[in-house]
Image (tube, rainbow, N blue to C red):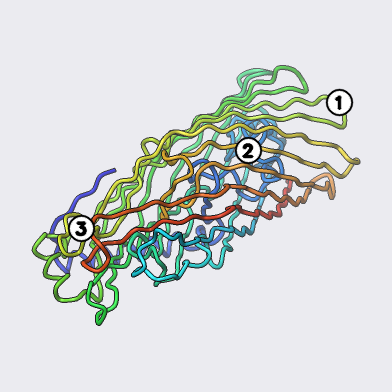
């Protein structure tokens, strides 16, 4: 995490804002289709509207049954005949609502903030995937999907407003890919991950004097980050295959002027004296590298078993908390939040109900990425996660398939315990003590696959 403060001119700030708006227009359609989600042990989701939702990600990098393998393991394209395409969409509802505890500073009020994730708990997702056969052994592919981050919105006057009011951290990936079949058993694949990152963060500022109400600090930026996805697929025999993937770290370097509004004269003077009022904020987010190993085995004409084990390096993520600890004696606009690496394990099955119908089942677990057990930051109300998925798909013709899938992600009860030395009455953020009870997310997806 890199954070830097310096004075900037109004002209430079205007140039920055025009540039950010330009990139926003470029990514608007992609973001609408492929907005990121928060589910896993960290902020990378396996849910992009495909059959993997019903499998709870079991067999993620070994299934290779449709064009979504461009995203999950590019080497799997060597199993696809001809030209294939898949389009997916999903709707999610997250039960992430805050309960204020008795230790919270009374002057913060009793507004619980409402449903924190999405709009009233709802937010969309999905993706588009394409595979083209240059020859039986050489494939080209392209994927568009968003699996990093989420929108987070609390009521403006909620009890934790001095820690966060709203924040959006999204990554939409464009993935041109290639795969080559080395021999009858081994295939290799690679893809360029061009990730368009979108970041906003808004927090209330304690003006101390009630006559002024709350001030506001906002950061808004867009940027590109670059990474590489590598995949290997090894077919042990006709019915069993093993997939191994590595996705590199992607650096999203956000930067922008600190936009303050509605500051009281006293707070504005204190910020100006500290050199923070006209500062530039740099936020270096590192989307973590990850490794996934998966297996698929066809037991008989009806049953297949799938499994996955994965690792994500969240210890280098370096997310930031924007705000002011004490407006009477401001020191910094930012503080770092430490994280730890996570592990993922999943198991699932496919059952051939009839010639046109295939059913999917799966369960998975992700370890937590916030280091203090069940205690989390209101900036990221998630940690460990259990997934339970079910789905089915129907072969409509020799060239088309459609499917439905649903998944429930249980995050348990998460606590907050944020305490400050400066009371709210003299400019502090106050103590925010409470919990997010029985957090969970329902994922509903639909997809269609075509061969040409």
Q: Return the x and y of residue 27 as percentages of the image width and height.
A: 45, 59
Cα distance in 3D space between marks 1 and 3 = 61 Å
Tag count: 3
1 and 3 marks in contact (CB < 8 Å): no
Give the camera-side residue of 127 and 437.
437
Cα distance in 3D space between marks 2 and 3 = 41 Å
Q: Quadrant of the N terminus?
A: top left
Cα distance in 3D space between marks 1 and 2 = 23 Å
Is 58 left, or right, of 272 in this rendering? right
Which residue is located at x 39 percent, y 71 percent?
A: 109
Give the camera-side residue of 221 and 44.
44
- Give the residue furthest to the right: 354
Q: Which residue is mark 1?
A: 300
Give the camera-side residue of 408 and 113.
113
In terms of secondary structure, where does tag 2 sit?
A: helix
Q: Return the x and y of residue 390 as percentages of the image width and height.
A: 75, 45
- Is residue 102 shown above or below 141? below
- Is residue 414 shown above or below 180? below
Of the image marks 1 and 3, the number of the one nearer the N terminus? 3
Q: Which residue is mark 2?
A: 69
- Badge nearest the viewer, 1 or 2: 1
Is 41 left, or right, of 359 in this rendering? left
Q: Which residue is mark 3?
A: 280
């Amino acid at each position: 995490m890199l954070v830097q403060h310096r004075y900037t001119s109004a002209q430079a700030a205007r140039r920055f804002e025009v540039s950010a708006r330009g990139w926003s227009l470029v990514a608007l359609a992609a973001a609408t289709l492929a907005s990121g989600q928060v589910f896993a042990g960290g902020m990378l989701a396996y849910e992009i509207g495909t059959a993997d939702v019903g499998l709870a990600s079991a067999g993620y990098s070994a299934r290779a049954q449709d064009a979504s393998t461009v995203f999950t393991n590019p080497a799997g394209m060597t199993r696809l005949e001809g030209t294939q395409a898949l389009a997916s969409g999903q709707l999610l509802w997250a039960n992430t609502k805050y309960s204020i505890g008795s230790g919270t500073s009374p002057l913060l009020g009793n507004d619980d903030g409402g449903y924190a994730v999405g709009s009233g708990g709802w937010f969309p997702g999905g993706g588009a995937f394409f595979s083209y056969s240059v020859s039986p052994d050489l494939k080209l592919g392209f994927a568009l999907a968003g699996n990093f981050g989420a929108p987070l919105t609390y009521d403006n006057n909620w009890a934790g407003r001095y820690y966060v009011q709203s924040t959006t951290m999204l990554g939409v990936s464009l993935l041109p890919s290639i795969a080559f079949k080395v021999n009858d058993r081994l295939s290799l694949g690679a893809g360029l991950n061009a990730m368009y990152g979108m970041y906003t963060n808004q927090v209330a500022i304690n003006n101390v004097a009630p006559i002024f109400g709350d001030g506001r600090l906002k950061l808004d930026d867009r940027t590109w980050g670059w990474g590489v996805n590598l995949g290997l697929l090894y077919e042990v025999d006709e019915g069993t295959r093993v997939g191994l993937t590595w996705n590199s770290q992607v650096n999203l370097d956000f930067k922008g002027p600190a936009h303050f509004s509605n500051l009281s004269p006293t707070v504005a003077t204190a910020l100006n004296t500290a050199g923070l009022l006209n500062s530039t904020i740099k936020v270096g987010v590192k989307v973590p590298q990850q490794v996934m190993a998966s297996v698929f085995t066809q037991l008989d004409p009806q049953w297949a078993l799938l499994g996955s084990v994965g690792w994500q390096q969240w210890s280098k993520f370096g997310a930031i908390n924007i705000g002011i600890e004490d407006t009477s004696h401001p020191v910094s606009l930012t503080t770092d939040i430490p994280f730890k690496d996570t592990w993922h394990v999943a198991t699932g099955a496919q059952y051939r109900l009839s010639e046109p119908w295939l059913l999917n089942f799966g369960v998975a677990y992700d370890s937590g990425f916030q280091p203090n057990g069940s205690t989390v930051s209101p900036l990221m109300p998630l940690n460990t996660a259990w997934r339970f998925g079910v789905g089915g798909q129907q072969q409509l013709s020799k060239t088309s398939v459609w499917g439905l899938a649903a998944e429930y992600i249980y995050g348990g009860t998460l606590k907050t315990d944020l305490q400050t030395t400066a009371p709210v009455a003299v400019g502090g953020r106050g103590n925010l003590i409470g919990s997010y009870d029985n957090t969970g997310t329902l994922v509903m997806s639909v997809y269609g696959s075509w061969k040409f």
